[in-house]
């Protein structure tokens, strides 16, 4: 984008292409005034259109002469009687049908989009006063005003309600308009529901607006059609709520907003002692009968193995709770999940199945049990002095104590040296070790059987490495990234 030109620079640039700029220069995309180099007329155009030679004049180069324009009009059987100024400038022509003079653009005549003054359709034909009276009499129309032409509005009497209204004769003669449009307007004193009309405001074309007084003393302004169609029966304030009104379990104690009628926002007290806020029409139409929290549980309530320790009310109905399971794990969820039918009710935290011998394990580790003997023990404590020391699975196979350890890359990838020391200590105590290195998957029955056969033939430790081991991040790496991200956020 280049530098904006000054007024003098723009004038000089226009002069170089042979056109004089006489208007104020703003930018090359904003129209301004120029002087035609041929006829010296002033015309308006874009500076860039003049500078790139797209526009060279005001259009006078393409103008026909008076005689050429007349000859072109005669070719379509219409005589030009006015002065030709341009193809898009109106001038006078003589109608070939009724010989009346009418104005039109030469382009419309030459393209034959206009072939007469309109007398062919009988719209613009100037009739005498007697002819007009006879035409109105034949059609049952009473024209009160003076007839000028078919397009000039004058006074007519409505054939239905006898009111006087203004309209063009052509509209009445073509039967596009059959009445004044106010025949069904109400009158002062008419009553609709609780509203009595005190003033009528006629519309421009049809219908009207009214000012009505309600039985409660307030005024209402609106379309008469709303009253006639029974869409409006009162001012809207008659249904305003009042403090102390009771609807089912709710008693209104405060009106928050000042909207008319049912749209008012209210605050109500429920029988359970809780506050409810909402629209008045929800209470009035029995869509809302209580605060929605009457049946919420209390702290200490028991559901199966869960004991409620915290209640979190929702905005509209029901609540969320935090409950403690007998295994010590916390459960969070909606109260409705605890009160479903018996076959769907939640009675525990869901993690109780993962507690084996008092220690939390994983679903993958538990699923390994189907490949092992029935008597295999999960989370077996092999050291009585150190209660926390245990193996994932322990069982006896052909007289040999076997410890099966499932090492997930996420948790064991950063402590491989520690695991080696641990397995050495197990071997010193007489255990045979099967180590499974994995990343979210488990070995097959065949791999377990092959490992057992190797131990049977004298191996003290067998390692099964599955696909995925060594891929992805470990717990320590993720912890470091989270620490760095938190420092960046601070």
Image (cartoon, rainbow, N blue to C red):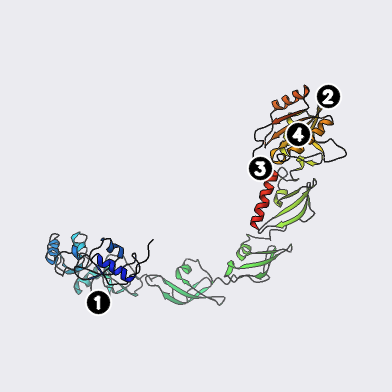
Furthest residue in direction right, as rendered: 385
User: Is the C-beta separation of discs 2 and 1 under 8 Å?
Assistant: no
275 left or right, relative to 190: right
Gap in Å between the C-alphas at discs 3 and 1?
A: 97 Å
Is label 1 in a helix, a strand or a loop?
Answer: loop
Is label 3 in a helix, a strand or a loop?
Answer: loop
Q: Give the label, 3 or 1, closer to the camera.
A: 3
Gap in Å between the C-alphas at discs 3 and 2?
A: 40 Å
Of pointers 4 and 3, the one earlier in the residue sequence: 4
Q: Is residue 315 above or below residue 422?
A: below
Q: Which residue is mark 2?
A: 399
Q: Give the label, 4 or 1, closer to the camera.
A: 4
> Dot 1, how many residues are within 10 Å of its Cα: few (below 14), some (14-19), or many (20+)?
few
- The numbered disc on residue 473 is 3
Q: Which residue is mark 4?
A: 405
- The numbered disc on residue 188 is none
Gap in Å between the C-alphas at discs 2 and 1?
A: 128 Å
> Dot 2, how many residues are within 10 Å of its Cα: few (below 14), some (14-19), or many (20+)?
few
């Amino acid at each position: 984008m280049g530098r904006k030109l000054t007024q003098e620079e723009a004038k000089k640039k226009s002069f170089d292409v042979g056109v004089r700029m006489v208007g104020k220069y703003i930018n090359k995309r904003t129209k301004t005034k120029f002087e035609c180099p041929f006829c010296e007329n002033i015309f308006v155009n874009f500076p860039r259109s003049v500078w790139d030679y797209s526009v060279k004049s005001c259009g006078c180069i393409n103008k026909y002469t008076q005689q050429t324009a007349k000859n072109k009009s005669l070719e379509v059987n219409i005589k030009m009687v006015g002065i030709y100024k341009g193809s898009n400038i109106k001038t006078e022509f003589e109608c070939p049908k009724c010989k009346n003079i009418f104005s039109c653009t030469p382009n419309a005549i030459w393209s034959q989009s206009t072939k007469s003054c309109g007398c062919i359709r009988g719209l613009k034909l100037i009739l005498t006063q007697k002819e007009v009276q006879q035409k109105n009499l034949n059609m049952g129309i009473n024209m009160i005003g003076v007839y000028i032409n078919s397009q000039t509005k004058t006074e007519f009497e409505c054939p239905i309600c006898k009111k006087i209204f203004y309209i063009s004769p052509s509209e009445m003669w073509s039967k596009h308009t059959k009445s004044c449009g106010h025949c069904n307007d109400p009158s002062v004193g008419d009553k609709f529901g609780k509203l009595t009309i005190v003033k009528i405001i006629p519309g421009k074309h049809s219908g009207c607006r009214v000012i009505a007084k309600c039985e409660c003393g307030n005024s209402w302004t609106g379309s008469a059609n709303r009253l006639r169609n029974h869409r409006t029966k009162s001012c809207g304030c008659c249904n305003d709520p009042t403090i102390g009104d009771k609807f089912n379990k709710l008693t209104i104690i405060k009106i928050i907003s000042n909207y008319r009628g049912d749209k008012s926002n209210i605050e109500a007290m429920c029988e359970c002692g809780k506050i409810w806020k909402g629209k008045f029409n929800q209470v009035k139409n029995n869509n809302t009968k209580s605060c929605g929290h009457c049946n919420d549980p209390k702290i200490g309530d028991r559901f199966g193995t869960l004991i409620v320790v915290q209640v979190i009310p929702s905005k509209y109905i029901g609540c969320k709770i935090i409950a403690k399971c007998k295994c010590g794990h916390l459960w969070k969820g909606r109260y409705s999940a605890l009160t479903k039918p018996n076959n769907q009710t939640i009675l525990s935290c869901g993690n109780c199945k993962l507690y084996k011998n008092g220690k939390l394990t994983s679903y993958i580790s538990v699923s390994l049990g189907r490949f092992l003997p029935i008597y295999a023990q999960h989370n077996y404590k092999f050291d009585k002095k150190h209660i926390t020391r245990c193996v994932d699975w322990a069982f006896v196979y052909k007289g040999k104590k076997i410890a099966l350890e499932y090492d997930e890359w996420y948790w064991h990838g950063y402590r491989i040296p520690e695991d080696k020391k641990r397995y050495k200590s197990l071997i010193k105590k007489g255990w045979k070790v099967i180590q499974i290195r994995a990343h979210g998957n488990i070995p097959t029955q065949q791999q377990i059987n092959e490992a057992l056969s190797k131990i049977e033939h004298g191996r003290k430790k067998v390692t099964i490495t599955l696909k995925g081991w060594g891929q992805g991040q470990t717990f320590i790496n993720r912890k470091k990234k989270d620490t760095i991200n938190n420092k960046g956020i601070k």
